[in-house]
Each structure stands twice: as C-alpha cells, then as structure tokens.
Amino acid sequence: MTSTVAPSALVETLRQRRQRLAQRIDFPVVLWSGQPVSRNFPALTYPFRASSHFLYFAGISLPNAAIRLDGGRLTLFLDEASPSAALWHGPTPSREDLAATLGADAAYPLAELPRFASGVATLAVQDAATAAEQLPIRGIIQPAQDKALALAVIALRLEQDAAAIADIRTAATVSVQAHRAGMAATGTATTEAQVRAAMEQVILSHNLTCAYNSIVTVHGEVLHNEQYHHPLQRGDLLLADVGAEAPTGWASDITRTWPVSGQFSPTQRAVYDVVLAAHDACIAKAAPEVEYRDIHLLACEVLAMGLVDLGILQGDPVGLVERDAHALFFPHGVGHLLGLDVHDMEDLGDMAGYAPGRQRSDRFGLGYLRLDRPLQAGMVVTIEPGFYQVPGILQDPDRRDRYRDCVNWDRLEDFGDVRGIRIEDDVLVTATGAEVLTADLPTLASEIEAIVQSEC
Ligand code: GLY
Ligand code: MN
Ligand code: MN
C-alpha cells in the first residue's frame, strides 16, 4: 500500500528519521510497539504507551504494532480492530489510514510479520509479553546487528530534531504552568496530595500525561519519593519534581523546592542559594564539546564551596570533592539525557548515557552519574543539583568515620529544617551554548516565595 495523502509534517519528520537511520545501517530492522499490560484482569490495563524506539520512527503510540525499517522504507504491521473493540472503545482508524498518517510504504496484518522479520535486528521492548514474542518471530538472533542498531538509534536520538524540540517545548510549557499552580496551591493545601493534584490537574487539563510518577513531598531527602500523604507544616520545604509528556511522547522534567509558609527560613534560604549557585554555574558551562562529567564535578565543587562557607563541610572544596565528601549531601548525578524517555534511552543501560569505552565509576560521588559524554548541539539534558540529609547516608557509621574530619556535625544540626532541596531544569545544547527550555519558571528564592505567597 502506498500513502496517498499529502505529506504532513509528521510524515516528513518520520521520513527524515528513517533516512538518517538508513545512512547508518545497511540491514533491516523491526521495532515492536509493545502491548497494554493488564493490571488485574485482561480488560483492565495500565495506560498504554508505545516503546520509545518505535515511537521515534512511527510517531503514533499504536498498541500491538510493529514497523519494519529497511533502506528508508517503512512497513507497518497491525491488525484491524475487531467489531467488539469498536463497541467498547469506539471506532479506530483502519490500518490503511494509519499507514498513510505515518507515511508507511506498505502495511500488513501482524500475521504477516514472521515472513518479514526472520533474522532482523531489533531493540527489546519492556513489556514481557511482547519481548517473549520477539524471539520466535526473529528466529535467528544477530547480537552484533542488534548492537549496531542500538548505536545507530542512540546517535540519532542524542541529537533532537526540530520536531522533537518543538514537542519538548510543549511539554516544558505545560510543566512550568503545573509548577506555578503547585506553588500557588500550597497556601491553602493541607497535604502533599493536594499540591500534587493541583499540579497534575494542569497537565491533565491540557490532555497531556505525566512523563514519570510525580514527586511532591516534604521529605525531599527520599530522592524519588512517591508518597503523598504527609501533612504540610509551615516550616517544611516542599520538593516537587513533576513533568508533562507531550502527546507525541516527548518528556519534560522539572523540580522546584519551595517553603510551605511562603518564606524560606534563614537556614533553608542559605542552602537553597548554594544549590542554586551550583545549578546556575552548570547551566552557564553547558555548551557543545563540554564534558557532562565536568559539569557534574562543577556542581559538586560549587556545592562543596557553599557548604564550607556555611560551616557544614570543612576543608578545601576541591579536596573534599576528590574525597567524595560532597556526596554525603549530593549523592546523585547532576542530570541525564531527556527525550522520549525522561531518562532518555536508559532501556539500553549505559550505552546511551556513556560514550563508547567509558564505564560507570564505583566512586561514591560518581556512581549515579547517568551521563558521561561530551555535550553536542541538539542534545537535551537536565541540570538538577540538590542537597539532601539522607539518614541512611549521614547515620552510616562507616561514612561518619570516613568523613569525620570533613563535616562539622554540630553545625549540621542547625540545618535540621533542610531535608531535601533540588532545582532541576531542562537544557537544550545549541551550536554556541545552551538554552534553558524551562526558563519561564523562576529559580530565585525571592521569586518563588512571591508565587507561593500569591495565594496564601
Ligand atoms: N524526575 C526524575 C529525575 O529527575 O531523574
Ligand atoms: Mn531529572
Ligand atoms: Mn526530575
């Protein structure tokens, strides 16, 4: 079947992605979208979202579909919806209509796939049922080709094209509104859940989804806290890490931390400004060719310097970072790739995040660094330094012993109302530097206080 519709922007974007893949590999590929995962019985499923690799080349989140890419040609494999599906779910576009929408050169029922998929390269999907189907359909597995495919797709997806950047901007714009709504709702909210609801309401009302499970917590020291039951106390800091996903799948990822009362305490403000100094220094350094690892280490040094000034750490900041003492309070990496996945392409382990030949360090201060590549124009990354008082780290006898000369533990007690602070923005690397895609959301403490107070 040949597409008869006039080429749309989507068709042209997808065609260019296929062509760029064809310039990198000379063997056929099949990518599966995956299938809905049942929650408790077959008809009750979790919301479906196609595999990101499929979505990159197919543009539409079609369940139970596969695409074959070969020399720039796209073949779609998809079954027509059954009549009973229409009863429950409404009319569904025909296979032919969908093929036209994504500019497919041909389209077949799924039963035809084995005929076209023997020995092809692929990338594994996350849902177990589809992963199990891939193996018998491919028959022969080509590990070297699978790896070459992964490297080719990584090369493409590291450099976001214009359509992707436009969609990340859409997601970022809505996320900024969600954060403003969360800040404004805090004055009258009594629980984390109410602030979360105010934030996700903005995302849902734009008919978008969340790119990941929201973190809205007064216990920011739990890095990915997904509990929302705590009451809000006036002396608390509220950490909100909430990001929308565009209808096409592109993600955003924003964190802000604000005082429930509308005013930071002096200790909260002092540490906030240290984290903000690290955030600003990292963004100022972001540019093509700059090693992301060096941006991470810059965050560590600025944090260490600020914590020395506050009397929490003691010693020379550079020496403290060499000993990983900063990681007592900043145990994660300064950010990650952002794209169709919030941690983009992490389904491939560290293949995307780490340049060929590089491996994760087992150092306390580097082990959670998710990205170790030189930045390049078109890359979108997050910058998200933080400060946390994690009991499991700070009360660990071995660490207390190893770092007993680095920390003024008595002074640290003065900062008991600072459990967790993170400031996170999404940054597009440009030809000459970087653009903060989430810059419409203030980071200055005084501006954040003003938004929180606007509804108090
Ligand atoms: N929202 C998850 C993260 O920032 O890594
Ligand atoms: Mn992030
Ligand atoms: Mn985040």
Image (tube, rainbow, N blue to C red):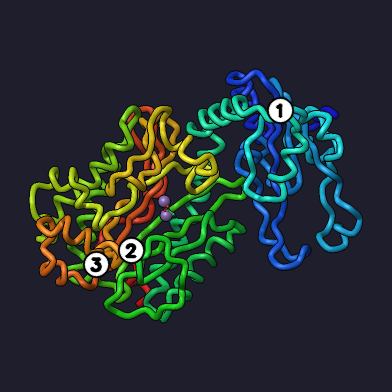
Task: Give the CA distance from mark 3 to mark 2.
Answer: 24 Å
Q: Quadrant of residue 378?
A: top left
**Residue 443 point in image, percent of width and height:** 30, 56
**Residue 13 point in image, percent of width and height:** 62, 31
Amino acid bearing label 1: Val
**Residue 145 point in image, percent of width and height:** 62, 25
Give above or below for 181 relative to 27: below
* Pointer 3 residue Cβ closer than 8 Å to ligand 1: no
Count every numbered label the image shows and give the total: 3
**Residue 250 point in image, percent of width and height:** 55, 45
Quadrant housing the N terminus? top right
Q: Nearer the viewer, mark 1 or mark 3?
A: 3
Among the two numbered marks 3 and 2 on one chain, the one whose residue lies closer to the N terminus: 2
- Decide which of 360, 440 is in the foreground and name it: 360
Task: Give the CA distance from mark 1 to mark 3.
Answer: 52 Å
Mark 1 secondary-structure assignment: loop
Identify the residue at horizontal 43%, vertical 28% (top origin).
Answer: 356
Amino acid bearing label 3: Gln
Q: Can I make out residue 226 in this image?
A: yes
> For this view, does 383 lie left or right of residue 198?
left
Q: Quadrant of residue 419?
A: bottom left
Among the two numbered marks 1 and 3 on one chain, the one whose residue lies closer to the N terminus: 1
Q: Residues within 10 Å of mark 3 (few under 14, many from 20)?
A: few
Among the two numbered marks 1 and 2 on one chain, the one whose residue lies closer to the N terminus: 1
Amino acid bearing label 2: Thr
Find disc 1 in the rendering and name its residue.
Answer: 120
Mark 2 secondary-structure assignment: strand
Q: Can I make out residue 161 in this image?
A: no
Find disc 2 in the rendering and name its residue.
Answer: 257
Task: Give the CA distance from mark 1 to mark 2.
Answer: 47 Å
Find disc 3 in the rendering and name its residue.
Answer: 395
Identify the residue at horizontal 43%, vertical 37% (top origin).
Answer: 353
